[in-house]
Image: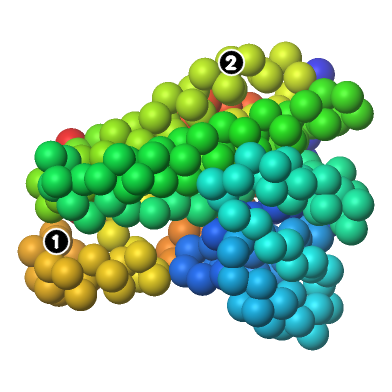
Amino acid sequence: MTDYPLPNFSVDLSGQTALVTGASSGLGLRFAKVLAASGAKVALAARRLDRLEALAAEIKAAGGQAVAIEMDATDADQLIGAVEKAEKALGLVTILVNNAGIPDAQRAHKMSIELIDRVLDINVRAPWILSCEVARRLLAADKPGRIVNIASSAAYSYGGNGAALYSVSKSAVVRMTETLAVEWARNHINVNAIAPGAFASEMMDGMLARIGDFSATTPRKRIGDPAQLDSTLLYLCSPASDAVTGTSIRVDDGQGGR
């Protein structure tokens, strides 16, 4: 039997390298800062390099290590290249947070083929490619790892606000989490997901601009603060969740119903 401490709970990420996509704003920006504050070296990936560089400077000023990596989530070569750049700069990626995502914001029958492809490319294809590339390198190095996919409460309940494809894509993220967890369980690569409800972010700002402030209709009359996701993120990225894989944790403040 392993001699575990009492309690067996640690969110110390010292010695780990994390790659966070969509890190230029919203939840991804917060996730990157939280991981860095917990000791991880953090690779910041997104399209807006200026924002990433500002965030990297902030993390470094606080005593952490970070590198900015410009990446278009629709470009497979850039996805694979981001993992390579992160490893060269900070070491083998042992934590991947697949956060980048976009809404559809249109009724299904009105969507262009271009928009359909873009939603599926960013929300489904990109996290699949990145997960496989990170896992491939972990397997070659015989190292354990953590992959955290950002799904959505929309994967479980469609609100009917012109986000049908977004809902489908996030359901795919949940199923991706479950299947890849099985594939890599024997290799100690844990694959889990967080399914947030309505939390403040750049994407949420866009939704509020389109449909108005709906916070009064939620059970707790509020939009969530990204800080309320810190504990779930750290749990899934850290030794605390050693035996947890293939799980999607709903953090929706009671908004989604059951």
Mark 1 surroundings within 10 Å by alpha-carbon count, few (fewer than 14), some (14 through 19), many (20 or more): some
State which quarter of the image contains the N terminus.
Answer: top right
Q: Are marks 2 and 1 in contact (CB under 8 Å)?
A: no
Tell me which amino acid carries mark 1.
Answer: Thr
x then y, percent, for residue 233 = 56, 52
Decide which of 3, 203 is in the foreground and name it. Answer: 203
Q: Circle 2 sits in a helix, a strand or a loop, which is it? A: helix
Residue denoted by label 2? 182
In-image side of 225 versus 100 (left or right): left
Looking at marks 2 and 1 on the same chain, the residue that comes earlier in the sequence is marked by: 2
State which quarter of the image contains the C terminus.
Answer: top left
Question: Looking at the rendering, which quadrant does residue 105 occupy?
Answer: bottom left
Decide which of 233, 183 is in the foreground and name it. Answer: 183
- Give the color scheme: rainbow, by chain, secondary structure or one colour: rainbow
x then y, percent, for residue 92 = 86, 44
In-image side of 54 versus 13 (left or right): left
x then y, percent, for residue 179 = 52, 18
Residue denoted by label 1? 218
Decide which of 134, 61 is in the foreground and name it. Answer: 134
In-image side of 201 versus 210 (left or right): right
Q: Which residue is drawn at 12% across and 73% down?
A: 212
Gap in angstroms between the C-alphas marked 2 and 1: 35 Å
Tell me which amino acid carries mark 2.
Answer: Val
Seen in the picture, residue 48 relative to 172 is either above or below; the reply is below
User: Residue 143, can we see it?
Assistant: yes
Point out the residue furthest to the front here. 113
